[in-house]
Amino acid sequence: MEIREDRREPGLVVAVSGRVDSNSAGELEAALLARAGEPRLVVDLGAVEYVSSAGLRVFLMLAKKCKAGGGKMALCGLAPGVKQVFDLAGFTPLFTVEPDAAAALARLA
Amino acid sequence: MQVRADNTAEGVARVTAAFDAFAEERALSTLLIGSVQVVLDELLSNTVKAGYPGGGPGTIEATFEVADGLLHVTLVDDGVEFDPLAREDPDLAAPLEERPIGGLGIYLVKQLMDDVAYERQDGWNRLRLAKKLEDPI
């Protein structure tokens, strides 16, 4: 898994790639929760191969922390398999989900 | 294909790498590969974390096979008796604030696979999983 940050006004885009599983979730948690204070945070999952429940747990924690801090967050770029796991877990309605980072930033602006 | 590994994170990585090699050889779809990797992560990380409460070495074994239009995955371990199918499903309708963190893994396994069967035999947990090769969603 790799994580890259890109300041794109009016927000911050964190792009994740590779496999989000029990092996990589700790690193993702540290990177994302450190950015939970951003007023507009977009997590781009466009290059993610799959997300297991260890990863879902991180996104849920992030959503709760952003909400508690008054910031807005969105997810984007979910591949069909990733979208399927979010849907099965009942997570999709809990998040703002957009096709790509530009749409997500526009939605949060 | 059969792979045997230790009850450690490295052992889990060995099994997932073996599945990647098997999937490439059999030209399985990206969607199917993702589903199986999620299932392996849920089940094996759970076995490693909770299956050996007294510590000490253990063995996990995975078998991958394609037959009759199905992918068959069998996972075996010598940890404490644990039937993942006996767990209750989580409440998926709860609002964000009330969602418990975790508890979703086994539910995902049941949803992502077409068939899951558990048996305890001679001190081994044996989980047989099957997934249709076509129409993976």
Image (cartoon, coloured by chain):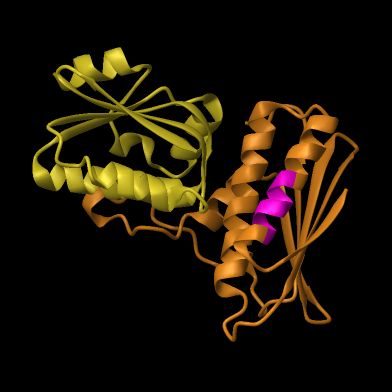
Chain colours: A yellow, B orange
- For the point 67% across and 45% down, the residue is B113
Look at the picture and state if A6 lies above or below A69: above
Residue A38's spot in the image, x, y percent?
Answer: 15, 35
- What are the residue bounds of the magenta stretch? B11-17
Q: How many labels does the image show?
A: 0
Q: In this orientation, does residue B49 appear?
A: yes
Residue B23's spot in the image, x, y percent?
Answer: 78, 35
Residue A3's spot in the image, x, y percent?
Answer: 40, 34
Residue at the limit of the structure toward the bottom, as seen here: B54
- For the point 65% across and 59% down, the residue is B10
Q: In this orientation, does residue B110 appear?
A: no
Work out whether residue A65 or residue B73 is closer to the camera in this orientation and state it: A65
Q: In which quarter of the image is residue A98?
A: top left
Q: Is the magenta stretch mostly helix, strand or loop?
A: helix
Work out whether residue B67 or residue B24 is closer to the camera in this orientation and state it: B24
Residue B104's spot in the image, x, y percent?
Answer: 47, 55
Work out whether residue A17 or residue A57 is closer to the camera in this orientation and state it: A17
Residue at the limit of the structure toward the right, as seen here: B68
Magenta segment includes A23: no
Residue at the limit of the structure toward the left, as seen here: A70
- For the point 63% across and 49% down, the residue is B39
Quadrant placement of the C terminus of chain B: top right
Look at the picture and state if B26 lies above or below A69: above
Q: Quadrant of residue B30?
A: top right
- For the point 36% across and 16% down, the residue is A100
